[in-house]
Image (cartoon, rainbow, N blue to C red):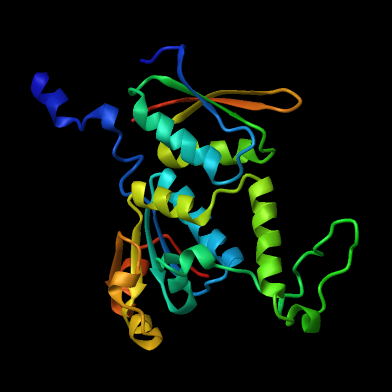
Amino acid sequence: MKADIAAVPDAQQTPEDFPQPKRLALIVSKGTLDQAYPPLVMATTAASMGWEVAIFFTFYGLDIVHKDRMPKLSVSPVGNPAMPPPMKKVPVRIPTLVGALPGMKTAATKMMKSWMSKANLASIPELLEIANELGIRMYACNTTLSVLGVAKEDLIDGVGFAGAPAFLDFAGESDVQLFI
Amino acid sequence: MGTTEVVSEVDARGLVCPMPTIRLGQAIRRVEIGQLVEVWTDDPGSKENMAAWCKNTGHELVAHSADDTTYKYTVRRSR
């Protein structure tokens, strides 16, 4: 009888419930403060649910993992018609031409950061730290480094380097793939 | 298997997505299999979020309750 029991897979492990962790593959192509959040929120949430996650930073998305540019991610009022009015009591959105005036981007970024802080939203550096802790794989696109003249040393620690074949290889084996 | 005593409490009130589930994940890793973690949050979408998180991680959502401002979830580390 003992032999029979031994032949049965360990019931407590229930491997059939979790044969393989799910996988999330993200391409991050935008480098504004508002566009840095969706991929990092998705990635850290997925990793906290036990998913394997890889993020490929390409073009402006590279700024999110750039040592000097990451703290300066900003929001532009230009070409951003959905941007909320600066003053809640005066429901007037910033016209594009006004948004193009000097100082407006700084003002818009300051405004956005104050809203984020009031809502207790985690900061981008905090989310990147969590991403690292949770073992999220982060890659910078090789081609972008060359095109934008970014050196490997300019990027934060923990970021690897990969190209389209490596992304496709991971994405091809993933359950969810998003281009942001 | 497992106890009914909560050994870890996570006060995620005031925190927005993704932090409540991130904090829950951190707390779960610090307790033994079979032990309970309780999360407090004021996120009105938390019921769906906690259920999805538990479904994906395999941990068990043992109980949940709510008053006017706070939702409470009890999760058992299952693996």
Instruction: Judge whether residue A134 can be spotted in this image.
Output: no
Quadrant location of residue A92?
A: bottom right
- Residue drawn at (31%, 60%), measured in percent from left and top? A157
- Residue drawn at (46%, 71%), measured in percent from left and top? A63
In percent of width and height, residue A73 lies at 54, 67
Q: Nearer the viewer, residue A141 or A166?
A: A141
Q: Nearer the viewer, residue A13 or A129?
A: A129
In percent of width and height, residue A80 lies at 71, 75
Counting every numbered tag in the picture gives 0
Quadrant location of residue A6?
A: top left
In percent of width and height, residue A24 lies at 42, 59
Instruction: Judge whether residue A129 can be spotted in this image.
Output: yes
Quadrant in which the C terminus of chain B is drawn = top left
In percent of width and height, residue A94 lies at 81, 73
Q: Nearer the viewer, residue A160 or B38?
A: A160
In the image: residue B72, left or right of residue B32: right
In the image: residue A56, left or right of residue B22: left
Q: Residue furthest front?
A: A103
- Residue drawn at (62%, 32%), measured in percent from left and top? B13
In the image: residue A133, left or right of residue A28: left
Quadrant in which the N terminus of chain B is drawn = top left
From this view, report whether residue B26 is shown above or below residue A105.
above
- Residue drawn at (49%, 57%), measured in percent from left and top? A40
From this view, report whether residue A120 is shown above or below residue A14.
below
Q: Residue furthest bottom?
A: A147
Q: Nearer the viewer, residue A109 or A168?
A: A109
In the image: residue A148, left or right of residue A94: left
From this view, report whether residue B57 is shown above or below residue A38.
above
Q: Residue furthest left?
A: A3
